Image: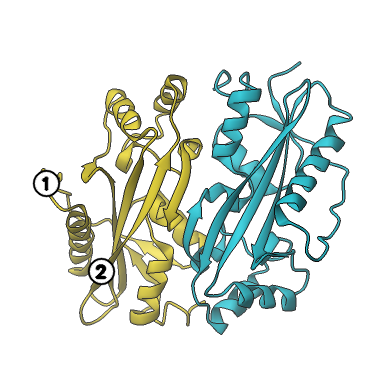
Chain colours: A yellow, B cyan
Amino acid sequence: MTASLVLASLSPRRRDILQQIGISFDIIKPNYTEIPPSIGVNPIDYCMHNAQEKLRNVCQVYNNRIILSADTVVVLEDRILGKPSTDRESQDMLWKLSGKTHKVISAIALYPGKETSISAYDITEVTFRNLSQVEVDWYVKSGEGRDKAGGYGIQGKAAVFVRHINGCYFNIVGLPVALLVDLLLNHAPQLWPSAI
Amino acid sequence: MTASLVLASLSPRRRDILQQIGISFDIIKPNYTEIPPSIGVNPIDYCMHNAQEKLRNVCQVYNNRIILSADTVVVLEDRILGKPSTDRESQDMLWKLSGKTHKVISAIALYPGKETSISAYDITEVTFRNLSQVEVDWYVKSGEGRDKAGGYGIQGKAAVFVRHINGCYFNIVGLPVALLVDLLLNHAPQLWPSAI
């Protein structure tokens, strides 16, 4: 068994965060397609389920490695905002978020290389400025919001939209770092702190 | 007169943030040496003064450009933590922050290319996890905390230390983006939103 981590996610943001904190890892794409959230589903349950299913899928093949999966959803007034696939959807989503506070939930699931897997989630509140038409058009034109939960990425140009956050910043980007360290400390100490 | 901004700061973090949000700029080093904070000084006054003095210095030469300066201080229990210059100082500073909530204050000053300059500040609360000796040693060895206010950079490895933030994330990195947009909208609309 090797001490290095398997990241069961193709998200470039999650890859960047793990690199930032100096954890070495391999990337394996989970063979799992998210089911769109049904109306009235509990956002935490939905997010946790997605992270757990991605983990389960990769565990079936790499059952002697430490594996990490994650899922992130953006929630406005108890409804999950998906990933916009057109400019029109991007625009609509930004107007919904403008001037309001929404929640970002990221779930992570960890298989410590043996025994049972564990999962947990973190919630961060994000407050947007009142946006102008020029700003919305500029952002939609950039294409940065496409295929991102909630239609924006705080680590890019949408930084200008965010007035305030309450919680873990990295949770918004897609990987709650402090929560991840908690799980590693308790369940995979050979990765943290022994490997640092 | 050109619409582009002059950044009166050599901070690579401020440069990165401006690039992230797509504002073009030139960099001019202010010829101003910060005076170490005296005991009992008001941290907001100190930070605002530094930003204003950096701006004033660059304005003397480039008085037909839009100029932005900034200063950031880390405050624990009403005392400003400086920039550690030795490993010992780095270590001491991390232990002070461990398990506690501190404040990061960033002041920005803007000269809109004519008339009078304006300045403002933002405060973000940052809560650290309880650190372990291994983590402190690992961070000090990385050298990342050297010459950074408060002895850490959230945009690097110290991400693992931060449990929670309350306020603007970019304020911690060194440039309060939402506040900057407020100032540009009101005092330099040729840069925002007209130039986007």
Q: Is residue B35 above or below residue B1?
A: below
Q: What's the residue at 43%, 28% (across, down)?
A: A131
Q: What's the residue at 84%, 53% (across, down)?
A: B34
Q: Name the residue nearer the viewer: B164 or A9.
A: B164
Whether discs 1 and 2 lie on one chain: the answer is: yes
**Residue located farthest toward the top when viewing the structure as drawn:** B1
Which amino acid, by three-letter code, is at mark 1? Gly
Q: Quadrant of residue A25?
A: bottom left
Q: Quadrant of residue B192?
A: top right
Residue at image mark 1: A40
Dot 2: what SS?
Answer: strand
Which amino acid, by three-letter code, is at mark 2? Ser
Spot occupied by residue A48 in the image (x, y as percentages of width and height): 21, 60
Q: In which chain is the residue bearing label 1?
A: A
Q: Name the residue nearer the viewer: B150 or B100.
A: B100
Q: Can residue A22 be seen here?
A: no
Q: What's the residue at 43%, 54% (across, down)?
A: A166
Residue at image mark 2: A119
Q: Name the residue nearer the viewer: B110 or A120.
A: B110
Spot occupied by residue B122 in the image (x, y as percentages of width and height): 60, 46
Q: What's the residue at 69%, 56% (across, down)?
A: B73
Tell me which label, 1 or 2, sits earlier in the chain: 1
Spot occupied by residue B183 in the image (x, y as percentages of width and height): 62, 31
Q: Can residue A133 be seen here?
A: yes
Q: Name the residue nearer the viewer: B37 or A171.
A: B37
Q: Is residue B53 above or below residue A132?
A: below
